[in-house]
């Protein structure tokens, strides 16, 4: 049986050979983007092809925006799977149920459209395949969703009433090659353009621009299919194409993205070029650019917008690049397909190293033991080579692209080798990456994903086992630090390894953005919210920015961890070590300042003179003598490095790096005392100073007329995505073990309420049904009449087999409690292993702004290292620097919610003060919490104390 084109493994018919993507200065182009007519059918052959014929009446059809995905425009629904194919695995066949979108667009040529030359019709992205007709004539068909395809259409064009017809199937043989972890979103999702091509146009050209760091010279040669001249006025270059020229230049790097304006003039057109000179190599087992090893502080970027899916405007691409640059990120892996070409222009312009990845992933074959994997089946090799060629040819002239990646998660096979050989033969000036083949037979770098710290350290030391060829290769983590929900934890420890071992050249956090789809009921939707039969839930929301591109705490943490300048204090004499961690830039672009703070308030500040240390260099500078000592205050230095001048990506004053150097800690809080507990006549209440307790349960009821609810030990948190672990792993996650022990349903038994001369003691046993494990808790209350002091001691009973989520107190403040002020870590949330960016200071917020809007609700929003906090008229001080959260819902409600919109504020603000917390880790895909951040219940006991007073009297 002959298969229809969409089920055929062949990549395309009728399309032109791939070539570089560019805009010519004097060529006519006509964007065909806009409102198109649209008809959706349930199967590939429900409708015949007469719609493509001339004179077809599409009056009854709908309208749709092109570029766009029809499932985000009211036709059908998106579907999310991570690794599994959402259809039976029977390559290259696809299901009969195959949503098919017919598109029609009528257009006129502009009056000044040139009559000479040729015209091309260009599609920059169609998922998953297209068959195209112009004015009733079939042009051909193609697959390769995130790749550019062109047809020659000159002879078919007429001045007016051109009819473009495109049939798009959601599923095709190509879908087997596009099993990336993301929403399945069919449609013509990138632009459609008509390009005039004058006679004598360049068609394709290749800019070879290398940099010799020893000589300080650039070597330029532009190869062009059609002979022409290359001019670079600033460099005095004027040479024919194909001729090599060597001149002194400033090189391009991601830190110093220097480009030279140039022109390629062929007989038919003038093409503006922006040339960046740089040389990428592996030397002595290290990735070098321009002779220097580089460290990738990277992210994996999918193309995503919460309203338009993978259709991105230039403003969105720009927003991504600016956000990355402002957060010290210097590298992007275009996971897992070539991005819109305009994104690479931005990377060239602003400076980001790019791993450009081919549109290839066959992960779903893993579920069937890799049987039939297309990358190991010669029938598919032409399709693989087509994809490799379309990426390399389209993107070859971008200086930012330093590495080609064959694809992601395809297992291994001959097809990958064929791709590698083709890519190397075509472009020897870049490195080759593929993570899925541990032998590294075809790659220039040893790349892994989610390896834990200990293994990365072994690799760094060169102590890892493995094939010999791999031993000499540089190492990167192409994915690590899974940024799903609260986290990732453990970033700082990875960075320390990268900075310690030369072989470790950095990594790429997974991933840049949460793919939550804007939804009227759910806020942001994730897998399952569209009724998918098979889906992977919120695993699609694992980014450093929320769907609307607001930075998550994870991004703020990453910015701090990867800061390109390390500021360290050395002891009391006020010497500060400043290390320049840039690979190319010296420190002259930064301005350093110091401030001296007393209890969070700046009492003096000034400029810190730092020499323009070169890359890798270090300087020791001296802070001024500290202002007068004050034993009653906590004092510290804060040193900041900010941009000295405006840059293309941030204004002068933008904070790049900082550090705080503690000078003096405050002496311990005095424990008030004096008041004796008094039982009321009815024996129902006990008063202690200004506090009232329930005489039977020993529960604090009010303090200085402020009602307080349910104050007591709390050990539970609404599990984070990392607590919940990898859904596909057989061993139970830490959250599952917590629930099995009943930590989410602990009950408090009152064992004793003991008024005594020095205060009130309450003893409880906190335990869950069906378990003999318990936490014996003693509350000791004392008061001087106006302030109230609590000392809580928790002694575990039995052998607790899991770390506890938290140990602390929880209480409810009914009524108005909106403003929150604190002295401690801020402004954002921090957990034990995500606390690098937490800056000690005086902070203020309202309760709502304390919540971090993770797409799937979970533990969030804790502020760490709190010396005191004021909320709802209450002030709580502690010298054990607890963390606090304040919410208008309970932990139980937070735990039960699936979406943010499930959370409705109640009339009580629930406050937690934790003396100890379990870390976050990245076990949603990767290692769990490092041992030093685990909260071990056994051996105890632990104690915590704090002092309550009022703020509003
Ligand atoms: C890895 C994938 O490469 C990536 O696309 C994404 O799915 C990520 O995991 C998790 O979010 S593959 C995984 C099996 C390690």
Image: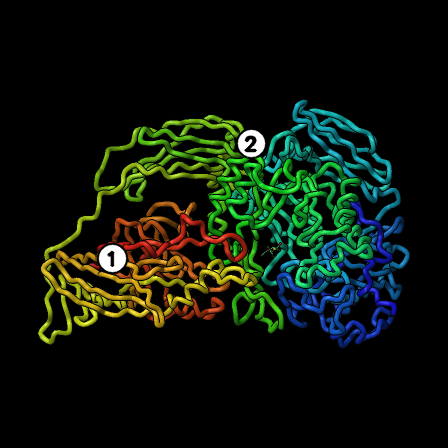
Kindly identify the residue that appears in the image at 54 percent across and 65 percent down. 524
Q: Is residue 798 left or right of residue 541?
A: left
Mark 1 or mark 2: whose residue is earlier in sequence: 2
Kindly identify the residue that appears in the image at 54 percent across and 57 percent down. 542
Q: Secondary structure at mark 2?
A: loop
Front residue of 323 and 744: 744
Instruction: Identify the mark at residue 793; answer none if there is no mark.
Output: 1
Q: Is residue 139 left or right of residue 874?
A: right
The part of the image, by quadrant, that contains residue 752 is: bottom left
Q: Could you tell me residue 901's position as x and y percent? A: 47, 69
Q: Which quadrant is home to the N terminus?
A: bottom right
- Asked if residue 21 shows in the view, the reply is no
Q: Is residue 697 left or right of residue 846?
A: left
Q: Could you tell me residue 251's position as x and y percent? A: 65, 31
Ligand 1 within 8 angstroms of badge 2 C-beta: no
Instruction: Identify the mark at residue 585; answer none if there is no mark.
Output: 2
Q: Which label sits in the foreground, 1 or 2?
A: 1
Residue lying at the far top of the rendered structure: 215
Q: Secondary structure at mark 1?
A: strand
Front residue of 663 and 36: 663
Q: Which quadrant is home to the C terminus?
A: bottom left
The part of the image, by quadrant, that contains residue 704 is: bottom left
Q: Is residue 901 left or right of residue 94?
A: left
Instruction: Identify the mark at residue 513; answer none if there is no mark.
Output: none
* Contact check, label 1 and label 2, Cβ < 8 Å: no
CA gap between label 1 and label 2 equals 53 Å
Q: Could you tell me residue 908's position as x and y percent? A: 32, 68
- Asked if residue 476 shows in the view, the reply is yes
Q: Could you tell me residue 169's position as x and y percent? A: 76, 67
Compared to residue 752, the image places residue 146 above or below, namely above
């Amino acid at each position: 049986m002959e298969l229809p084109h969409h089920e055929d493994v062949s990549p395309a018919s009728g399309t032109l050979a791939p070539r570089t993507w560019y805009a010519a200065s004097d060529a006519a182009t006509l964007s065909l983007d806009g409102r198109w007519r649209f008809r959706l059918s349930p199967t590939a052959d429900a409708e015949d092809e007469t719609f493509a014929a001339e004179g077809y009446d599409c009056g009854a059809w709908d309208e749709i925006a092109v570029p766009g995905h029809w499932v985000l425009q009211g036709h059908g629904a998106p579907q999310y799977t991570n690794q599994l194919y959402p259809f039976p695995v029977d390559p290259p066949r696809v299901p009969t149920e195959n949503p098919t979108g017919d598109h029609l667009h009528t257009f006129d040529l502009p009056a000044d459209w040139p009559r000479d030359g040729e015209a091309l019709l260009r599609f920059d992205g169609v998922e998953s395949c297209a068959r195209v007709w112009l004015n009733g004539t079939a042009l051909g068909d193609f697959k390769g969703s995130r790749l550019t395809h062109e047809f020659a259409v000159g002879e078919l064009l007429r001045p007016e009433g051109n009819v473009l017809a495109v049939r798009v199937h959601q599923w095709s043989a190509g879908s087997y090659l596009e099993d990336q972890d993301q929403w399945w979103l069919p449609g013509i999702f990138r632009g459609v353009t008509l390009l005039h091509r004058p006679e004598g146009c360049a068609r394709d050209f290749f800019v070879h621009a290398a940099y010799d760091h020893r000589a300080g010279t650039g070597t330029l040669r532009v190869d062009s299919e059609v002979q022409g001249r290359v001019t670079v006025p600033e460099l005095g270059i004027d040479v024919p194409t194909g001729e090599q020229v060597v001149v002194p230049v400033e090189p391009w790097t991601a830190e110093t993205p220097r480009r030279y304006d140039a022109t390629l003039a062929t007989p038919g057109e003038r093409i503006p070029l922006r040339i960046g000179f740089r040389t990428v190599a592996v030397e002595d087992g290290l990735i070098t650019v321009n002779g220097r090893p580089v460290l990738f502080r990277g992210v994996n970027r999918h193309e995503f917008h919460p309203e338009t899916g993978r259709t991105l405007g230039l403003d969105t691409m720009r927003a991504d690049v600016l956000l990355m640059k402002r957060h010290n990120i210097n590298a992007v892996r275009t996971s897992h397909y070539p991005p819109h070409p305009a994104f690479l222009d931005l990377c060239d312009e602003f400076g980001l190293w790019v791993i450009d990845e081919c549109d290839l992933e066959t992960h779903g074959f893993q579920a069937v033991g890799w049987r039939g994997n297309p990358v190991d089946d010669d029938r598919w090799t032409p399709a693989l080579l087509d994809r490799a060629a379309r990426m390399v040819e389209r993107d070859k002239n971008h200086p930012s692209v330093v590495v080609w990646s064959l694809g992601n998660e395809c297992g291994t096979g001959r097809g990958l080798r064929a791709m590698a050989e083709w890519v190397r033969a075509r472009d020897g000036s870049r490195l080759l990456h593929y993570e899925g083949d541990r032998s590294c037979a075809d790659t220039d770098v040893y790349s892994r994903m989610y390896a834990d710290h200990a293994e990365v350290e072994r690799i760094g030391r060169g102590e890892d086992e493995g094939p010999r060829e791999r031993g000499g290769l540089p190492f990167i983590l192409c994915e690590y630090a899974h940024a799903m929900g609260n986290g990732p934890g453990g970033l700082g420890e990875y960075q320390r390894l990268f900075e310690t071992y030369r072989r470790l050249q950095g990594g790429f956090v997974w991933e840049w953005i949460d793919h939550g789809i804007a939804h009227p009921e759910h806020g942001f939707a994730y897998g399952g919210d569209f009724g998918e039969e098979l889906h992977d839930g919120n695993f699609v929301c694992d980014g450093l920015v929320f769907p609307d591109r607001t930075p998550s705490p994870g991004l703020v943490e990453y910015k701090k961890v990867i800061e390109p300048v390390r500021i360290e204090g050395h002891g009391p004499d006020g010497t500060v070590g400043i290390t320049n961690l840039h690979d190319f830039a010296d420190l002259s672009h930064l301005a350093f300042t110091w401030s001296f703070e007393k209890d969070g308030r700046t009492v003096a500040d000034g400029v810190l003179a730092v020499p323009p240390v070169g890359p890798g260099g270090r300087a020791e500078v001296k802070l001024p003598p500290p202002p007068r000592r004050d034993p009653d205050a906590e004092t510290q230095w804060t040193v900041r490095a900010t941009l000295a001048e405006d840059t293309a990506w941030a204004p002068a004053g933008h904070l790049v790096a900082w550090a705080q150097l503690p000078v003096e800690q405050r002496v311990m809080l005095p424990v008030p005392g004096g008041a004796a507990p008094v039982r009321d006549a009815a024996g129902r209440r006990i008063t202690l100073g200004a506090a009232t307790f329930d005489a039977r349960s020993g529960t604090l009821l009010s303090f200085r007329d402020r009602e307080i609810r349910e104050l007591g030990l709390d050990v539970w948190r609404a599990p984070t995505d990392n607590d919940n672990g990898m859904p596909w792993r057989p061993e139970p996650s830490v959250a599952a073990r917590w629930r099995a022990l009943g930590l989410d349903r602990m009950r408090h038994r009152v064992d004793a309420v003991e008024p005594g001369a020095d205060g009130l003691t309450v003893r409880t046993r906190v335990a869950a049904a069906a378990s003999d494990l318990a936490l014996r808790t003693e509350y000791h209350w004392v008061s001087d009449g106006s302030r109230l002091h609590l000392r809580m001691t928790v002694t575990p009973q039995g052998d607790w087999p899991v770390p506890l989520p938290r140990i602390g107190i929880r209480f409810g403040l009914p009524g108005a409690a909106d403003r929150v002020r604190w002295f401690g870590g801020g402004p954002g949330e921090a957990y034990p292993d995500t606390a690098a960016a937490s800056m000690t200071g005086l902070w203020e917020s309202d309760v709502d702004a304390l919540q971090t809007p993770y797409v799937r609700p979970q533990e969030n929003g804790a502020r760490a290292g709190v010396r005191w906090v004021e909320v709802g008229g209450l002030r709580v001080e502690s010298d054990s620097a607890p963390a606090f959260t304040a919410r208008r819902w309970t932990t139980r409600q937070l735990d039960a919610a699936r979406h943010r919109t499930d959370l409705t504020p109640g009339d009580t603000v629930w406050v937690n003060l934790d003396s100890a917390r379990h870390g976050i880790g990245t076990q949603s895909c990767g290692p769990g919490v490092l041992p030093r951040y685990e909260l071990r219940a056994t051996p105890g006991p632990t104690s915590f104390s704090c002092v309550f007073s009022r703020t509003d009297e």
